[in-house]
Image (cartoon, rainbow, N blue to C red):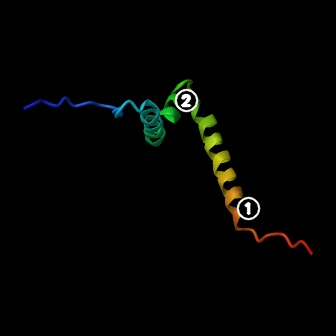
Amino acid sequence: MKKRQKSFGLRVEVEEGRFEKAMRLFKRKVEDAGLIKEVRDRQEYVKPCIERKLKKNAAKKRWQKKLSREELPQKLY
C-alpha cells in the first residue's frame, strides 16, 4: 500500500495535459481562500486609527450601494 503524504495548502492535479483548466481551478481556489487579499493586507503596516477609518468608509459605501439598489426607478414621463 502506498503512503499518502499530507499536503498543506492548495493543490490541483493536471489531468490529461489540460494545464489551462488546472490553472483556472487553482486561481479560483486561491481567490476563494482569500490568500491574495491577505498578502496585500500584509504588505505594509496600517495604523489602527487608519484601519478603523478605512473600515468605516467601506461600510458607508456598502450602505449607499444597498440604498441605491433599493430605490425605485426614475419615471421617464
Q: Position of residue 41 (x, y in %)?
A: 54, 31
Question: Considering only vertical position in the picture, is 29 above or below 44?
Answer: below
Name of the residue lying farthest toward the bottom: 77
Along the horizontal axis of the image, is 8 left or right of 69? left
Q: Are marks 2 and 1 in contact (CB under 8 Å)?
A: no
Residue drawn at 77 percent across, 71 percent down = 72
Residue nearest the viewer, comparing 17 with 42: 17
Amino acid found under the numbered disc labelled 2 = Arg
For disc 2, the marked residue is 40
Could you say which quadrant of the image residue 10 lies in? Answer: top left
Amino acid found under the numbered disc labelled 1 = Ser
Residue drawn at 79 percent across, 70 percent down = 73
Mark yes or no: residue 11 visible: no
Could you say which quadrant of the image residue 64 lies in? Answer: bottom right
Q: Earlier in the sequence, mark 2 or mark 1?
A: 2
Q: Position of residue 37 (x, y in %)?
A: 52, 35
SS state under label 2: helix
Residue nearest the viewer, comparing 28 with 48: 28
Rounded to the nearest whole Å, what is the CA distance between mark 2 and mark 1?
Answer: 29 Å
Name of the residue lying farthest toward the top: 44
SS state under label 1: helix
For disc 1, the marked residue is 68
